Amino acid sequence: MPAIEHEIHSAEEEGVKFEYLTAPVEVVVKDGKAAGLKLQRMELGEPDASGRRRPVPVAGSEFVVDATFVCPSISQEPEFDGLDTLKNEKGWISADAGGKTAAEGVFAAGDVTNQLGLVTEAIGLGRKAAEAIDDFIQKKEKPEVAPLAVIRYQNMYRDFFPKKERTSTKFLSAAEVKGSMTKEPMLPLSDEEFKEEVSRCMSCGLCFDCDNCWMYCSDGAVQKTSKDLPRGTHYEFILEKCQGCKKCAEACPCGYIDML
C-alpha cells in the first residue's frame, strides 16, 4: 500500500481497519442508499510481463461490510469533456516541461498529463505552467536552463560536517485527537527544533563560502573576490595557475567543484 508508515500507524490507532488483498465487488444498496460494500479476498498470482504478481480472486471468499457512507478513493481520472482533441494515444494530455500542449495557447499540468505523484509535484507542475502562461501572454522568450546535476554523497567531503541526528517528529495520541476536527496528530517543530534541523543542510551542489578551496590551493589558482557579492560567488578560479591537483574538489564539502 503506497502510504507513509506513520500515517498507517496513526490510522490504526484511531480505529481504521485495513483489509489487504481485498477488492470491492459491488455497493450494497438499501432503500436507494448505500448500506454496505461487498468485497472479495484476493491472492497473489503468477508474475506478469512486468514481473509483478497480480492479485487474483479467491473463489467463495465474498463478504459484506456494513456502511453508512461509501467513499471511493482509487481509480479516479480527470474529466476530459471538451478536451478530447488534446488527448494522446494513451488517453492523457501531452505537455512539455513547461506545460505547453500541441494546441496554441493551451497549457496543462498535473494528473491530466499522467504525472500521477504527490500533491507537491502537481503544485510544482502548476507553477511551471503558470510561468509559461505568463511568458506566452507577455510574448517573452524564456531561456532554457540546464538541469542541475545530481550530487551524490560520494562527491562530497562529508567529514567537514558534524554528525547530527534528524529531529524526531512528535505525535499526539489517538485519544487526544479523536473527535476533533482541528487537532493534527503530527506536531510541528518548535522554533529551536526548526533551526536545528535547518543547520543539518549540507548545501549539496551549492557553494556556501566555506573557504576550503581557497585554503587548500597551494598554487594560488583560487582567489577571493569582493565580500559584497552574493553568497557562493566569492571565489575566482584562475585556470592558468591550476596544476590539476584536485585538492579543491576533494575538499569541497558540497560537491560544487568539478574537475574536467
Image: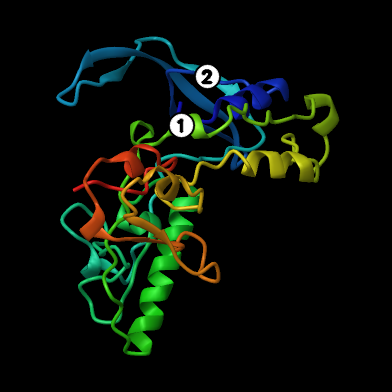
Query: Few, some or many C-alpha atoms within 10 Å of disc 2 (few <14, some 14-19, many ≥20)?
Result: few
The residue drawn where x is 77% and y is 42% is 192
* Left or right of 222 on screen, residue 166: right
* Left or right of 59 on screen, residue 2: right
Number of marks in picture: 2
Q: Is mark 1 on a helix, strand or loop?
A: helix
Rendered location of residue 226, percent (x, y): 50, 69
User: In this figure, which residue is indicated by the disc labeled 2?
Assistant: 19
| Quadrant hosting residue 11 | top right
- Amino acid under label 2? Glu
Nearest the eye: 220 or 237: 220
Q: Is residue 190 visible?
A: no
Measured in 3D between alpha carbons, the distance from the residue under mark 1 to the one under mark 2, in whole angstroms, is 44 Å
**Mark positioned earlier in the residue sequence (1 or 2):** 2
The residue drawn where x is 25% and y is 64% is 96
Rendered location of residue 207, percent (x, y): 45, 53
The residue drawn where x is 53% and y is 28% is 37
Q: What element carries label 2?
A: loop
Residue 158, labelled with which disc?
A: 1
* Left or right of 109 on screen, residue 189: right
Rendered location of residue 1, percent (x, y): 46, 26
- Vertical placement of 94 versus 196: above or below? below
